[in-house]
Image (tube, rainbow, N blue to C red):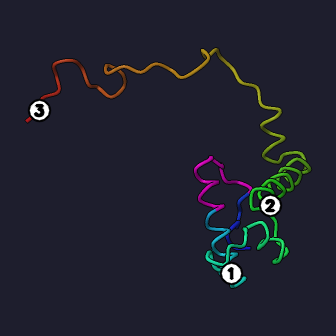
Amino acid sequence: MYLLHEAETWQMTEKFEDILKHCDRKMMRHTAGVRWTDRISSVEVAWRCGLTESRGKIRQRRLQWFGQVRREKDGGGLSRVEKMEVLGDMPRGKTKTNMEGDSGIRHGTVGYS
């Protein structure tokens, strides 16, 4: 299924999931030759085609991908991150930025033309 190519690494938001669901159902109906005016539910069309929901398929692929990464030999990406030690103190949350930071912008020095 090309629609879900490398989907295990996608960051799924609710909006993106809705777009994917709409696209999946539209392509499924086109492939099955079922029109919207035929009044057949998408679940019925998926059952006739022998397909499952794309959300479940993405979850399955994500778990398989994580299992492969987890079983990787020592020195792999995940094992290095697990053994990594973080030095220093950082406050929780987003750091505060101001206009007098690294950008060099100071009050009164920026002019508009």
Which numbered disc flags the more N-terminal residue, 3 or 1? 1
Q: Label 1 is placed on what type of residue?
A: Val
Q: Label 3 is placed on what type of residue?
A: Tyr
Is disc 3 placed on a helix, strand or loop?
Answer: loop
- Figure quadrant of the C terminus: top left
Say left or right for 64 vs 97. right
Is disc 2 placed on a helix, strand or loop?
Answer: helix
Q: Is residue 34 magenta?
A: no
Q: Is residue 11 magenta?
A: yes
Say which mark, if any, is on residue 57. Answer: 2
Segment colored magenta:
8-21
Is disc 1 placed on a helix, strand or loop?
Answer: loop
Q: Nearer the viewer, mark 2 or mark 3?
A: 2
Say left or right for 66 vs 14. right
Which numbered disc flags the more N-terminal residue, 1 or 2? 1
* Marks 3,1: beta carbons within 8 A: no
Say left or right for 7 vs 105. right
Give the quarter of the image for residue 20. bottom right
Give me the residue at 92% from left, 50% from top. 71
> Can you identify the residue that label 3 sits on?
112
Give the Cα distance between marks 1 and 2.
23 Å
Residue farthest to the bottom?
Answer: 33
Say left or right for 82 vs 33. right
